[in-house]
Structure formats: structure tokens, C-alpha cells
Amino acid sequence: MSSQTIERKDHHLDLCAGSPVEVVRPGALFDEVSLIHEALPEMSAADVDLSCEFLGRRLRCPLMFTAITGGTARGKALNLALAHQAQKRGMAIGVGSQRAMAERVEVEDTFQLREVAPDALIVGNIGLWQARSLGVDGVRRLADRIGADAMAVHLNVAQEMVQPEGDRDFGGGLKVIGALAAAFGDGLLVKETGCGISPATARRLVEVGVRAIDVAGLGGTSWIKVEHLRAGASTTGALFAEWGIPTAPAIAALARTIGGQARLVASGGIRDGLMAAKALALGADVVGLALPLLKAWVAGGEANGGEEALDRALDAFVAGLVSAMVLTGSRTVRSLGEVPWVGGPTFERWVERLCLGAAPRPG
Ligand SMILES: Cc1cc2nc3c(=O)[nH]c(=O)nc-3n(C[C@H](O)[C@H](O)[C@H](O)COP(=O)(O)O)c2cc1C
């Protein structure tokens, strides 16, 4: 990994943990969704079963720590803390982009989590534009080298466009994804990084064989804001600070159009157990989060106390999810998916327009 890339990695952690990098308006739009209350749930909180199937494995909780980091000593410490939690709680963990270890073999150990998380679902990560250069065999090697169960390929066109040194050529992406889907089968996850995936795009992904999609929508960490803060006023970042598809309508529209053809991860701005419950009710199979984990770990003192802070944050998150399940009378994640909900006007307009865009074009 070049020293420029190493510097960038830790700078990203600092910026994300300490600066306003989240999209405030319109946000993920979960505030426009209400779940219908069940006054007579006829169950005990102890009856709640959070387990679910994902990427060919059984999770004890429908939560994924989506890609954050790797490549530096600090990144390694955070990855290990997250891996402990994933192992302890039966959650899934994604490592940050493995571009670093593709370029410099000596940073590989910062991504090695199998020893501390022997049973956890571990997901590798690479950007689509790097995957295009590496080829299927190169991506397979990245997964194998860390003993990953599955591989995530991230889409980040907006970040590249506002990054002064970013890629500008985005041709041939779908073909690369098709080749990866053929090689990895159910073990391929295609994810965005904060701008969302529309049903029309998801349909193209499904058509080339993709079976798992993380919508990573607007409303949480914005890489446009991060890059703008990092590079200053010289970028087009300010112009696009609110660019993307809010997470809540994105997941509802995906469930309505391609649900059943791909497993769906809802991420992007999910900050508590109630938002997670709403995402699952809207049709997600699993909920993902990134920034709250980094913030809890940094606020807790990183190597000294970071993991206890993470533990407390995750306890609170799961408690919120369990409460929402009791309050909707949902014993299982599947039954939570059938809970009725009410959506506000902006949310509904987004869902309607997104679904319309996924309809086959006439002629
Ligand atoms: C510090 C940080 C680093 C990230 N690095 C990656 C990455 O390397 N690869 C990737 O696919 N996504 C990366 N993401 C994006 C997240 O996985 C996630 O899609 C996005 O942040 C939305 O979730 P959030 O709002 O909970 O943060 C990163 C996010 C953060 C906060």
C-alpha cells in the first residue's frame, strides 16, 4: 500500500469519528415510517428469536458490521474488537477494502480475523474498479487469504468523482460483477457505500446472477462529505452532499421489486434498534452499520476501553430491536417482515418513483 493510501486510511477514521460526515437532510427517512403497535403481543421478550440465514450461514442476530477498515495498526485494532463482538453475538463482520493488502502483502495481518472469530460470518471487501483490474482470480485470492466466507464488492462512483485522485472511468462494471457472481455464487454481496441502489440497478444485478445486495443508502456516512472535508473546497463535494437514495424507501422499493430474488441488507444511517426493526419490517433480511461502531470504539478510548464501549453500544442496539419486536408481536425476524407499517409522504413518493423506475421499459 502506498504511504498516501495509509495516511488516507487513518485520516478517514479521524474524519468519520470526529466531523459531521452524516447526511442530515433528507436523511434515511426512517422517521417517516411507523410500525403498528400491538397492544396484546401474547409473548415474552425471552421468546424473541433473532436468528436468520445470510450468505449461506446462520446468524444469531440479523446484524452485519459492514466494511470499515484495515491496512493500518489502528484499523487492525478496530477490526479485532469488531471480530470479538461478531463471534460473541453471532453477527456478521465485513472487513474494509482489501485494496491495501492487494498492493502490499505486509498489511495482510490487519485483515486477519478468523483466529478471534472462528465461527463468525466474515466478508471480504474490494471496490468494483479494483476488482476490474484484479480479475476474478485476484479477488478470489483476497477472500481466501483471510479465510472469508463471502466477498463484498463495493460501488462508490460518487466518492471517486469527488476525490481529486479518484477513478473517472466506470465502464464495464456489470460485466465484472457477472463474472464474480459466476465464481462466488451466493457468496457475493454487492454493496453501495452511502448513495443507495435503485430497484432498476438491482434488477440488472440480479440478471447477471447477484443474490445479495446491501443498499447502503443515503442518510448515514456520506463519502462525498468525507472527501470534501479531506480535500477542502477544491472538490465538487458540497454540490453533491445530499446525493443518493434514502435508505428506508430504497429498501422498501427493493423488497417490492426484486425481493425473493436477492437477500437484502439495509444499511446507511441505521442508528438504533428501532430503525433496524423498521428496516426489517420494510423487507430487509439483515441490517448493517458502520459509523456508530467506529464512533463508539473511538469514544471508548480505542485500544483502552473501545471494546467495552462497543459492547455497551451493541447491547443497547439489540435491546431496542427486541423491544420493537415485542411491541409488534414479532417472535422471529421473518414475522417482523410481515408487520404492517405506515409511511409518510416523502417516503411514499420515493418508493412509488423507485418502483416505477424498475418496471420493464416499453418497447
Ligand atoms: C470509516 C469508514 C470506512 C469505510 N470503508 C469502507 C470500505 O473500505 N469498503 C466499503 O465497502 N465500505 C466502506 N464504508 C462504508 C460502510 O460499509 C457503509 O456502507 C456506510 O458507511 C453506510 O453505513 P453507516 O451509515 O452505518 O456508516 C466505510 C464506512 C466508514 C464509516
Image (spheres, grey):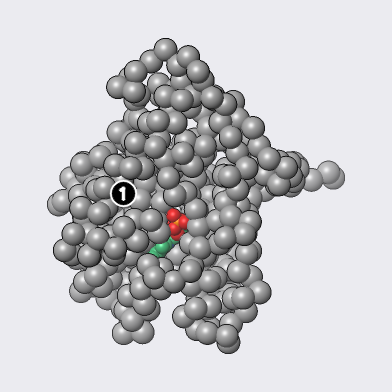
Q: Quadrant of ligand 1?
A: bottom left
Q: Residue at x 29, y 63 (%)?
A: 299
The single residue placed furthest to the front in the displayed view is: 39
Q: Where on the picture, by quarter, is residue 130?
A: bottom left
Q: Residue at x 40, y 30 (%)?
A: 323
Q: Where on the picture, by quarter, is residue 234?
A: bottom right
Where residue 242 sits in the image (x, y, percent)?
Answer: 62, 64
Q: Residue at x 55, y 70 (%)?
A: 224
Where residue 202 sits in the image (x, y, percent)?
Answer: 60, 47
> Which quadrant: the N terminus?
bottom left
Where residue 164 sits in the image (x, y, percent)?
Answer: 53, 83
Q: Residues within 10 Å of mark 1 (few under 14, many from 20)?
A: some
Where 51 sits versus 249, above or below? above
Residue 250 appears left or right of 55: right
Residue 12 appears left or right of 84: right
320 or 206: nearer the viewer: 320
Q: Is residue 351 visible?
A: no
How many discs mark residues in the rendered view?
1
Which structural element holds mark 1?
helix
Where residue 344 sits in the image (x, y, percent)?
Answer: 68, 40
The single residue placed furthest to the right in the displayed view is: 363
The single residue placed furthest to the bottom in the displayed view is: 234
| Amino acid residing under circle 1 | Ala
311 or 213: nearer the viewer: 311
Q: Residue at x 29, y 42 (%)?
A: 315
The residue labelled by disc 1 is 313
Q: Is residue 29 visible?
A: yes
331 or 122: nearer the viewer: 331
